[in-house]
Image (cartoon, grey):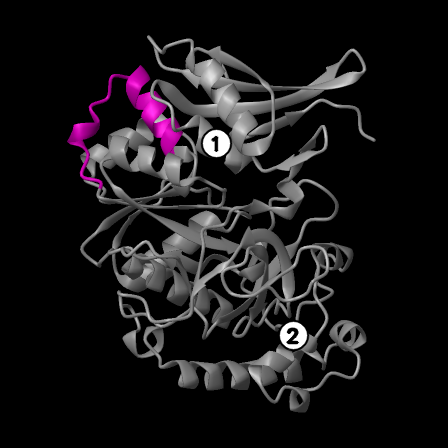
């Protein structure tokens, strides 16, 4: 552990620390007019137990956008500005104080250590450096840990592979689908992956299935770890899974998480999937009080993990409430399609769900890249499994590797050409 005295804190002491920090957050934010308006008469004295926090109103993405640029910011002397990668409405800006930058480095260092990374490792950082939080978060955490850093950033995949080999990188950090691009370029360039020294991958920023994870691990010869976080919470570092692979540890001395019904907002019991709600306990620039993330997950356990950490564990993120696709009355998430597609031999990891109209009706086509020599009957099997599991009856189109256009950032899994209703 990076900070064993905090990462293994006994539950009653952790709860007491959370309660103190909840009260401190509330005391600070209500001094600001915008927060005082939305929280009404709420005051720190109202928070007598951790459960009382749930009486406060939710904060939504639209509220953050509507107060652009810094309407809900509470810090002073900002040192960094980062911005969400959303494509609709005003962007969400997160200003960082010195303390916020230090906090970010701390939780990221914890994430590295949970993944088995040490100061002796060489970390190749492939997320972009800029307004996107990914590159800087991985960089700050690596510096805090004392590891060596290759801060190459996004793109230039052939160069990525060369430096990875020549500089003996042992840890790869990336958005979750970028390893697929590395593998693809390695095949095109006849690059020998066995010359790499990689042993750990830390991936996030996108939903990725267990099946995709297993394929990446097998082909790169690594053990991968799922890291979560978002611009609003301060970037990656909200949590990560450990080598036990029994849920994602949330650093509860810095963040409070809840799972609620996506429609009613009512609390969901542990083990039941719902929407993730996050509150920040130590962020100064942009504090969050009960922020609705739209991410879907569940609490796996509040018991100590075999690794010794005592923070609660979340399931890997299953999708987003705003990613849900509706086709002929059937609701599904792209990740559910991915899991079924990748179970089949000869099928590549690249796919798209294409939705369009057909003679006044709707048509769904799952386009799947296949390896040379793939049995064409796999299309019928995929179609049958999608029908059995999700009540969908799409066309399944097999195509050659490289057919699906590669996005510069996150993979585009759904192409919806249906007229906007």
Name the residue furthest right: 421
Residue 10's tag is none
Q: Is residue 25 visible?
A: no
Q: Horizontal placement of 382 versus 320: left or right?
A: left
Nearest the eye: 356 or 251: 356
User: Which quadrant of the figure contains the C terminus?
Assistant: top right
Residue placed under numbered mark 1 in the picture: 338
Residue placed under numbered mark 2 in the picture: 54
Magenta stretch: residue 192 in it?
yes
User: Which quadrant of the figure contains the N terminus?
Assistant: bottom left
Q: Position of residue 347 (x, y in %)?
A: 39, 20
**Could you tell me which residue is drawn at 81 percent across and 75 percent down?**
37
Q: Position of residue 7 (x, y in %)?
A: 34, 73
**Could you tell me which residue is drawn at 74 percent across and 57 percent down?**
68
Most prominent secondary structure in the magenta stretch? helix
At mark 1, the secondary structure is: helix
Q: Horizontal placement of 243 versus 338: left or right?
A: left
Mark 1 residue crowding within 10 angstroms, few (<14) / some (14–19) / many (20+): many
Q: Horizontal placement of 280 versus 251: left or right?
A: right
């Amino acid at each position: 552990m990076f900070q064993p005295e905090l990462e293994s804190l006994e539950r009653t002491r952790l709860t007491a620390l959370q309660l103190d920090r909840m009260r401190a957050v509330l005391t600070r934010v209500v001094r600001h007019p915008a927060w005082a308006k939305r929280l009404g008469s709420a005051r720190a004295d109202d928070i007598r137990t951790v459960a009382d926090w749930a009486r406060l109103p939710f904060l939504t993405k639209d509220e953050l956008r509507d107060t652009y640029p810094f309407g809900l910011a509470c810090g002073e002397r900002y040192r960094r500005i980062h911005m969400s990668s959303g494509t609709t409405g005003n962007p969400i800006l997160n200003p960082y104080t010195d303390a916020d930058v230090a906090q970010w480095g701390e939780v990221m260092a914890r994430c590295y250590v949970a993944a088995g990374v040490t100061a002796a490792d060489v970390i190749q950082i492939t997320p972009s450096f800029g307004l996107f939080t990914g590159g800087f978060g991985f960089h700050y955490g690596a510096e805090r840990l004392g590891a060596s850093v290759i801060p190459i950033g996004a793109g230039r995949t052939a160069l990525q592979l060369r430096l990875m080999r020549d500089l003996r990188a042992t840890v790869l950090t990336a958005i979750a689908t970028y390893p697929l691009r590395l593998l693809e370029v390695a095949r095109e360039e006849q690059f020998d992956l066995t010359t790499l020294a990689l042993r750990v991958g830390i991936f996030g920023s996108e939903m990725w299935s267990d099946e995709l994870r297993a394929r990446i691990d097998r082909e790169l010869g690594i053990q991968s770890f799922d890291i979560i976080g978002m611009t609003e919470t301060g970037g990656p570092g909200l949590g990560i899974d450990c080598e036990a692979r029994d849920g994602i540890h949330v650093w509860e001395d810095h963040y409070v998480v809840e799972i609620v019904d996506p429609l009613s907002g009512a609390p969901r019991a542990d083990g039941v999937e719902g929407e993730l709600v996050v509150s920040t306990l130590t962020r100064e620039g942009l504090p969050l009080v009960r922020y609705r993330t739209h991410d879907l997950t569940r609490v796996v356990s509040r018991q100590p993990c075999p690794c010794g950490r005592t923070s609660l564990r979340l399931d890997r993120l299953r999708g987003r409430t705003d990613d849900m696709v509706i086709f002929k009355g059937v609701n599904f998430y792209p990740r559910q399609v991915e899991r079924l597609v990748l179970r089949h031999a000869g099928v590549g990891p690249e796919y798209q769900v294409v939705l369009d109209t057909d003679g006044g009706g709707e048509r769904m086509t799952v386009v799947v890249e296949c390896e040379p020599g793939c049995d064409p009957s796999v299309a019928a099997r995929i179609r049958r499994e999608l029908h059995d599991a999700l009540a969908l009856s799409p066309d399944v189109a097999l195509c050659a590797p490289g057919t699906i256009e590669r996005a510069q950032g996150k993979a585009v899994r759904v192409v919806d050409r249906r007229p906007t209703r």
